[in-house]
Image: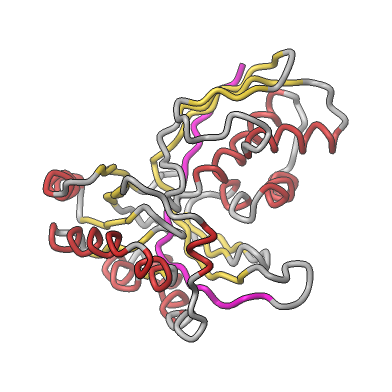
Amino acid sequence: MITKNSYTRITLALDIIGKIYNGPMKGYHELGIIKHQITLCDSIEVKESRSTKIECSDTAVPHDSSNICWKAVDLIKKRYGIDKNVTISIDKNIPVMGGLAGGSANAATMIDILNELWALNFSKEEKKQLGRKLGMDVPFFFDGGTAFDTETTGVLQKIDTDLFATFVLVIPNFGVSTRDAYGGIDYSKVAKKTLQTSEMKSCISLNDMSKVVSLMHNDFELSVFPRYPQLQQIRDKMLEAGCLNAIMSGSGSTLIGIVRNRKEAMRVCNSLEYKSIITETLKR
């Protein structure tokens, strides 16, 4: 039996560059994302069993072969001719459909666990290749830390930094589907801040927190906020409560507020009427 924490990430900046019209990724979108790993995590326990099954503390998580952790097991079994099964137990803390990549983090953790449990000796690059078969967000978690990622075009650049920040994550009582987030994109309005994302990469390397705060943005807000006006209202209340900046994470619905310290985070949380989580940069 092996148990590991599955640490997730937030997005400090997200540009929707545009839709891809040719090649193997036709129909997908090229993104420009700065991802930042945080201390919020699920816990995953895996043990060998007669048949594969999933147990999870959150009923919103699929308990069958549609679960990305189950898919990771099937992928590795088929690719390497392994005739074994496992029971996967997930203690869920990362909100579902919140734009926090909990599923992708779990998939990466499953690859790590199976690599150890079945003594497969994967290199980091092999793990990334397997992860990409499961989801375009998965490879990031084998490097972790802070990175720039385009996802569909396969560009993943680690950013060396000692940047440390405290965040308030506000969790609405509803999720935003990826289909809704992409379905409302106005291509005349997105990708307007790509220069800010490039500048942010440099500021992160220099540990310039004030500049990072000012450059935080998310293009998905342009399509999601009109459909879910409550999210914009929550963001505004977070700023009024004292967050230095607040944006949506990924395709939503979680909102990220960046604050000066944990004391400020507690004050912000206490002033809001929504479920909130205090988290920090994951030190590696």
Residue sitting at the far top: 50
Q: Position of residue 163 (x, y in %)?
A: 36, 57
Residue 46: quadrant of the picture:
top right
Q: Establish if 12 lies above or below 102.
A: below
Question: Is 206 positioned to the left or the right of 15 in the image?
Answer: left
Q: Residue at x 75, y 38 (%)?
A: 122
Q: Residue at x 69, y 52 (%)?
A: 132
Question: Is 119 positioned to the left or the right of 262 in the image?
Answer: right
Indicate the colouring scheme. Answer: secondary structure
Residue sitting at the far front: 227
Q: Which quarter of the image is occupied by the N terminus?
A: top right
Residue 224 lies in magenta, yes or no?
no
Foreground pick, 176 / 127: 176
Question: Is 185 positioned to the left or the right of 25 in the image?
Answer: left
Q: Residue at x 29, y 51 (%)?
A: 167
Q: Establish if 16 lies above or below 156.
A: below
Residue 258: quadrant of the picture:
bottom left
Residue 12 lies in magenta, yes or no?
yes
Question: Is 163 positioned to the left or the right of 155 in the image?
Answer: left
Q: Position of residue 215 (x, y in %)?
A: 34, 73
Q: Residue at x 78, y 67 (%)?
A: 24
Dominant secondary-structure state across the stretch colored magenta: strand
> Residues in magenta?
1-20
Q: Position of residue 105 (x, y in %)?
A: 54, 43
Foreground pick, 258 / 133: 133
Residue 250: quadrant of the picture:
bottom left
Q: Position of residue 52 (x, y in %)?
A: 70, 22
Q: Establish if 269 lies above or below 116.
A: below
Residue sitting at the far right: 81
